[in-house]
Image (spheres, coloured by chain):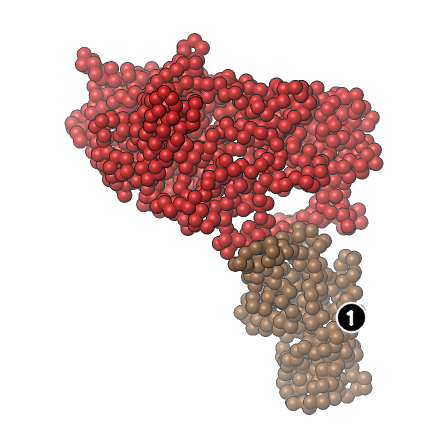
């Protein structure tokens, strides 16, 4: 017989628990919540010096005592003695950047009260605090004061929650102070709250404001900058409130916004600032088929790129066409709080009755800020040199052109000149022209590779810290000596086919180390061909739910910069154990087709395998080998078969309506010794490029079908939605007006066909240019989980395939890893891990990798752009360029040789007299009348026109930064 | 419950043929059975009470308030009475006794004001009063009295989280299409939660039987079996009568089921009113009782 027993809490008067009753309101539900809180007496103080708490220290699973965290000899300051710090919640909330400084702030106690106050205010901040506690060198420790019998405080009847928390913090500080008194260690309570400081001082606690405390530290100048603007703002609020006039309209109250959204008077949406004009943004609002424009500083009303805003549509007579003018970023470098209205920037609101007028709107409120730390440089003009070490206000010009300048105070202004720095925005008052922020970090000197790369990685949110130990622990113990077991009865050989005798080779860009894929082809006895695509078996090494797996999932993709690669998987796997290097045996995941003469698939078969690649070619080497008729060995023969089949496959795909879209891809030639950029060239595409591409596409499509059949709800697929027809409106109109051509865009097939037909015999590059512009009208492809869309929406528009996934690059993309696992389960190689059939989790992962993918692409592009600029440095080049956008006061040209886009301002055409410009909007044309003596003339600029431009780099006086300048040669 | 004729006769005679009447359990004619109670027994509810009526009936009630769609009247009260399976096989919602008790409790709750429960144009508090009969020595026991008293106490202890709606005036809206805001803020402090309003209209049910010339309150099963009629009468704290209803017309004894006069009926009401007010007054002490365990409302 079994007995049921339970622990009964003692009903004595000495309660060791407290009931905490509160009301929780979530998603329209309001609940009373009761928590019983038990108080403990065995929570250690975590000081290494303390002998009393030794016995209370927690043990790990092996029974070893976990060493306490706080140093026995903490920092000594004249004023405070040897001390530990206890900051209150607001210090963390406003100034965490300072606390994170690697060389300052050690031995800090984070009270549980502080933790819970922060977690209710900001989860990202809470996570940063947790990370701080994990960092061994900083010696930050959490302390559960709310669970500790000596530090617990109960709320008094007429006390607010805030006051109680402040009291709990003071109590904990005073407990620590008396607990450690005999050891000669003091406590300093950091708080900027005057009342709290006063009460603490009454209790005999050493207390200081963060600002005062920082002044005693060696790096006080840097740290003082990091003490957020808010602290100052709070301190001087009374003075500010009187007498300043508002630059911006006040935002509406939240309740008014919500009420007005409901009745349709205002709309909410995410604001996207134009890259050409930081004073113009657009918001996509349901109900308007065009994006709603928000232009001018007043209308934008303090919205920053990415914010969720509320907009009010302006009357129809104020509607206008998109970005008629380019905002010149040289304007307004004045530092003043109450600046005069920016009349020059606001477009004169003439009555516009144009056929493609966009609705316009103004921002009336901001629902959610999407601020992050911004990388940029200090605007030199705003630095007063004479001031020396004293504090001054300077402006940061962010790298992201869509972000306004940020004002911040610094004491180290002269030192920041020419440095890449990170600044965080704290607030943006209606009375302040610019947002106010505080200094976070110095990345290094501008224009140096290290600083610029770091800046790029930060701007695009690329995870680039070294792999943590937990991840490295997941690697095979043998390291580089790992080998495919020789004994074929070894369990690892189970269900693996032996393909070591197949003539397999890989074809990749030159110098490629992470070889994902290899191919082979041979003739079968029945006259058909056997074609195999072999993909690195990453999932053999990366098992689900390991640290390595979650790290790879959070990185999402490998990021390729010009001179640097940020790997998704540790080097050992990426470039060795998984990489299908030649002459060694490797595990692979193979996809084998039987094809006939016309590349029709007779049979497809997937299996895990062991391969031994015979050769690793570069595209050019492979091409040379195929072309060399003297080579008649079986490997070359196989490659010729592959090439032949790939051409048929490509033709089939094109007939289906696959798009051949162009985006300019350039290669940076670097000096071998210094890896400084030397020259830029457009990537050459060889037949072998498309050979590999075709078979990878085929493998991806075959796998997509297979995993979708096996897991209709949870297969990880990739889709490319058809772009809405309105996306093509303006391009179609431009084509009609300028070239008399027509672009049919109703299906991808007709688009592909009409793209082929749009050829200007006089301008051979025109077709490529058109393809580039067409690409920009497209939506981007995305990963998704098959249960979230209806099968017709699985379609990949660009590839004209009804279903698609990514399978062929598991070393550098996480989506492929998922596809591998699902395929392995689909062929009964292994049982499926539950995480791969959890739809909501897969959706989350897909969203994550879509985001990472986008960021990686942008980071890669930005890196190329930077290197193109570097390669051009010092030189002057005259190049052919094409006009791809026309504005009132300038136009955008595309320089094919550099894959570079740049703005030419009409006022730059003459240095003497500003030219008269006539903007013929209907024809996308500028008539520029140059009035210079002795040769006045008129220059016409129209869309698609080929022009000659001079490309130089100049040093920008304000930023001290090299920048590419493009001028028209006429 | 079937009683034998001698039993019925004995009960009838001892009440009608003695002065003062002698009841089986020794009570006086206007005396309720000893009862005790406990409030705030369920920490997870907005209000709760437990009532023990002699050793024959025991009831627990929890009041849960939830935010729901407003009704034309405002908010609403929803009653539900369950019988513990250990008490009776009649424990399904649709069974006769639970549904009778549920509708009786709902009738009492319907007297309460609900307009103030609405806090935005479409949102209001829906207050669920959920009772469980955890003990009843027989399905024919006087459950109603215990149920109504438990509900009365539970409602007295009920607190609604404080809700504030933004003070949206026409000036801040500045809009021609003004609609009152649907926004509301919930005060997360339980200490600030507010009691229910208008509970003086909540009644307690007193059972009164007329046996020949004698009126007895809170009859036992034997007593009601010999009564001409037994009334369930709702009494408010003011003594006002809110509800009357005939329950159990006896167990087949000669005198049962006979009509009574209007004067007799008024007499019954007056008796109930006196007893009811006394009970409600006595029970108010329990609300300030802080100790553990049961508090004797009427010894």
Relative to A959, is A640 on the left or the right? left
Picture residue at 45% right of the left edge, 38% below the top: A847
Chain drawn in brown: B
Q: Residue furthest front?
A: A934
Relative to A776, is A24 on the left or the right? right
Residue on which disc 1 sits: B281
Q: How many marks?
A: 1
Relative to A270, is A96 on the left or the right? right
Q: Nearer the viewer, residue A875 or A530?
A: A875
Picture residue at 53% right of the left edge, 33% below the top: A404
The part of the image, by quadrant, that contains residue A28 is: bottom right
Asked whether residue A123 is in view, the answer is yes
Point out residue A519 in the picture as x, y percentages from the top left corner: 29, 23
Chain A takes which shade in the image? red
Crowding near pointer 1: few (<14 within 10 Å), some, many (20+)? few
Q: Nearer the viewer, residue A608 or A847?
A: A847
Point out residue A617 in the picture as x, y percentages from the top left corner: 30, 17
Point out residue A800 in the picture as x, y percentages from the top left corner: 28, 37
Asked whether residue A476 is in view, the answer is no
């Amino acid at each position: 017989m079994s007995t049921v027993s339970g622990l009964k809490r003692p009903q004595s008067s000495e309660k060791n628990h407290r009931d905490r009753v509160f009301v929780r309101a979530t998603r329209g539900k309001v609940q009373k919540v009761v928590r019983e809180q038990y108080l403990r007496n065995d929570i250690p103080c975590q000081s290494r010096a303390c002998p009393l708490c030794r016995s209370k220290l927690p043990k790990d699973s092996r029974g070893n005592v976990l060493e306490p965290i706080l140093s026995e000899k903490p920092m000594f300051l004249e004023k405070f003695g040897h001390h530990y710090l206890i900051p209150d919640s607001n210090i963390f909330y406003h100034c965490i950047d300072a606390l994170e400084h690697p060389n300052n702030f050690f031995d800090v106690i984070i009270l549980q009260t502080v933790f819970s106050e922060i977690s209710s205010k900001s989860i990202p901040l809470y996570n940063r605090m947790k990370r701080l506690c994990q960092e061994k060198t900083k010696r930050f420790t959490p302390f559960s004061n709310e669970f500790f019998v000596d530090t617990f405080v109960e709320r008094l009847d007429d006390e607010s929650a805030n006051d109680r928390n402040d009291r709990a913090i003071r109590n904990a500080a005073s407990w620590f102070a008396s607990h450690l008194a005999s050891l000669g260690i003091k406590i300093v309570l950091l708080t900027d709250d005057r009342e709290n400081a006063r009460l603490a001082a009454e209790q005999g606690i050493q207390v200081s404001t963060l600002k005062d405390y920082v002044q005693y530290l060696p790096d006080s100048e840097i740290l003082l900058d990091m003490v957020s603007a808010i602290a100052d703002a709070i301190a001087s609020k009374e003075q500010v409130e009187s007498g300043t006039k508002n630059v911006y309209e006040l935002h509406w109250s939240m309740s008014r916004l919500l009420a007005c959204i409901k009745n349709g008077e205002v709309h909410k949406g995410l604001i996207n600032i134009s890259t050409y004009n930081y004073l113009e943004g657009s918001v996509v609002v349901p109900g308007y088929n065009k994006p709603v424009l928000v232009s001018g500083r007043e209308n934008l009303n303090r919205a920053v790129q990415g914010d969720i805003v509320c907009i009010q549509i302006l009357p129809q007579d104020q509607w206008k066409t998109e970005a008629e003018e380019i905002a010149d970023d040289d304007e307004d470098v004045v530092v003043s709080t109450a600046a005069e209205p920016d009349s020059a920037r606001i477009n004169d609101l003439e009555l516009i009755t144009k056929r493609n007028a966009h609705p316009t709107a103004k921002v009336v409120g901001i629902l959610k800020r999407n601020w992050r730390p911004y990388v940029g440089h200090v605007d030199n003009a705003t630095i007063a040199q004479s001031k020396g070490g004293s504090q001054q206000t300077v402006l940061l010009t962010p790298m992201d052109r869509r972000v306004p300048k940020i004002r911040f105070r610094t004491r180290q202004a002269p030192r920041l000149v020419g440095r890449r720095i990170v600044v965080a925005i704290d607030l943006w008052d209606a009375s302040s022209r610019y947002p106010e922020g505080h200094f976070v970090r110095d990345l290094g000197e501008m224009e140096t590779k290290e600083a610029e790369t770091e800046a790029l990685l930060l701007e695009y949110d690329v995870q680039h810290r070294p792999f943590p130990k937990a991840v490295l622990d997941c690697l095979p113990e043998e390291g580089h000596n790992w080998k495919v077991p020789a004994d074929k009865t070894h369990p690892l050989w189970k269900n693996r086919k032996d393909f070591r005798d197949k003539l397999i080779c890989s074809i990749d860009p030159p110098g490629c180390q992470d070889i994902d894929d290899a191919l082979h082809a041979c003739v079968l006895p029945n006259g058909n061909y056997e074609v195999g695509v072999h993909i690195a078996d990453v999932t053999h090494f990366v098992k689900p739910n390991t640290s390595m797996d979650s790290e790879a999932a959070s990185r999402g993709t490998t990021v390729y910069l010009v001179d640097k690669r940020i790997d998704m998987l540790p080097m050992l796997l990426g470039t060795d154990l998984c990489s299908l290097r030649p002459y060694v045996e490797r595990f692979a995941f193979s996809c084998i087709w039987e094809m006939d003469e016309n590349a029709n698939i007779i049979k497809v078969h997937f299996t895990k395998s062991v391969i031994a690649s015979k050769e690793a070619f570069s595209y050019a080497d492979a091409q040379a080998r195929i072309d060399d008729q003297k080579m008649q060995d079986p490997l070359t023969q196989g490659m010729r078969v592959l090439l032949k089949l790939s051409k048929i496959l490509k033709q089939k795909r094109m007939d289906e309506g696959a798009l051949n879209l162009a985006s300019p891809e350039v290669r940076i030639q670097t000096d071998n010794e210094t890896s400084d950029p030397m020259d830029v060239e457009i990537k050459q595409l060889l037949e072998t490029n498309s050979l590999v591409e075709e078979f990878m596409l085929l493998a991806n499509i075959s796998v997509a079908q297979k995993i979708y059949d096996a897991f209709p709800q949870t297969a990880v697929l990739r889709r490319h939605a058809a772009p809405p027809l309105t996306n093509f409106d303006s391009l179609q109109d431009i084509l009609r007006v300028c070239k008399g051509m027509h672009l049919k865009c109703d299906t991808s097939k007709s688009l592909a066909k009409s793209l082929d037909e749009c050829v200007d015999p006089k301008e051979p590059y025109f077709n490529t240019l058109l393809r580039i512009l067409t690409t920009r009208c497209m939506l981007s492809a995305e990963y998704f989980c098959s249960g979230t869309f209806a099968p017709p929406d699985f379609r990949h528009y660009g590839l004209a395939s009804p279903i698609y996934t990514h399978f062929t690059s598991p070393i550098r993309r996480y989506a492929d890893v998922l596809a591998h696992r699902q395929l392995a389960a689909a062929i009964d190689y292994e049982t499926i891990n539950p995480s791969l059939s959890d739809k909501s989790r897969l959706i989350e992962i897909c969203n994550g990798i879509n985001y990472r993918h986008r960021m990686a692409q942008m980071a890669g592009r930005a890196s190329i752009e930077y290197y193109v600029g570097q390669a051009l440095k010092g030189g002057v080049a005259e190049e052919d360029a094409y006009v791809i956008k026309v504005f009132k006061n300038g136009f955008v040209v595309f320089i094919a040789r550099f894959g570079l886009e740049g703005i030419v301002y009409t006022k730059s055409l003459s240095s003497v007299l500003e030219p008269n410009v006539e903007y013929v909007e209907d024809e996308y044309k500028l008539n520029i009348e140059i009035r210079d003596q002795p040769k006045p003339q008129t220059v016409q600029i129209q869309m698609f026109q080929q022009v000659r431009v001079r490309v130089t780099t100049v040093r920008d006086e304000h930023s001290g930064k090299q920048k590419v300048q493009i001028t028209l040669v006429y | 419950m079937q009683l034998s004729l001698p039993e019925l006769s004995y009960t009838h005679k001892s009440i009608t043929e003695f002065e003062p009447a002698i009841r089986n359990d020794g009570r006086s004619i206007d005396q309720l059975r000893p009862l005790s109670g406990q409030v705030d027994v369920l920490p997870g509810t907005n209000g709760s009470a437990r009532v023990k009526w002699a050793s024959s009936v025991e009831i627990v009630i929890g009041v849960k308030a939830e935010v729901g769609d407003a009704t034309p009247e405002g908010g609403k009260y929803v009653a539900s009475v369950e019988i513990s399976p250990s008490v009776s096989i009649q424990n399904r919602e649709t069974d006769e006794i639970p549904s009778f008790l549920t509708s009786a409790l709902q009738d009492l709750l319907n007297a309460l004001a609900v307009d103030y429960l609405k806090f935005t144009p479409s949102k209001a508090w829906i207050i669920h009063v959920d009772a469980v009969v955890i003990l009843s020595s027989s399905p024919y026991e006087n459950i109603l009295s215990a149920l109504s008293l438990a509900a009365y106490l539970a409602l007295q202890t009920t607190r609604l989280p404080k809700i504030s709606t933004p003070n949206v005036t026409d000036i801040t809206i500045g809009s021609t299409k003004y609609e009152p805001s649907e926004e509301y803020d919930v005060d997360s402090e339980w200490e600030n939660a507010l009691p229910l309003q208008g509970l003086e209209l909540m009644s307690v049910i007193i059972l009164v039987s007329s046996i020949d010339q004698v009126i007895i309150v809170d009859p036992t099963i034997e007593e009601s079996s010999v009564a001409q009629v037994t009334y369930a009468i709702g009494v408010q704290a003011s003594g006002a009568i809110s509800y009357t209803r005939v329950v159990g017309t006896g167990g087949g004894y000669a005198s049962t089921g006979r009509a009574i006069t209007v004067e007799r009926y008024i007499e019954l009401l007056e008796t109930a009113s006196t007893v009811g007010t006394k009970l409600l007054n006595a029970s108010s002490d329990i609300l300030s009782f802080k100790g553990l365990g049961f508090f004797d409302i009427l010894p």
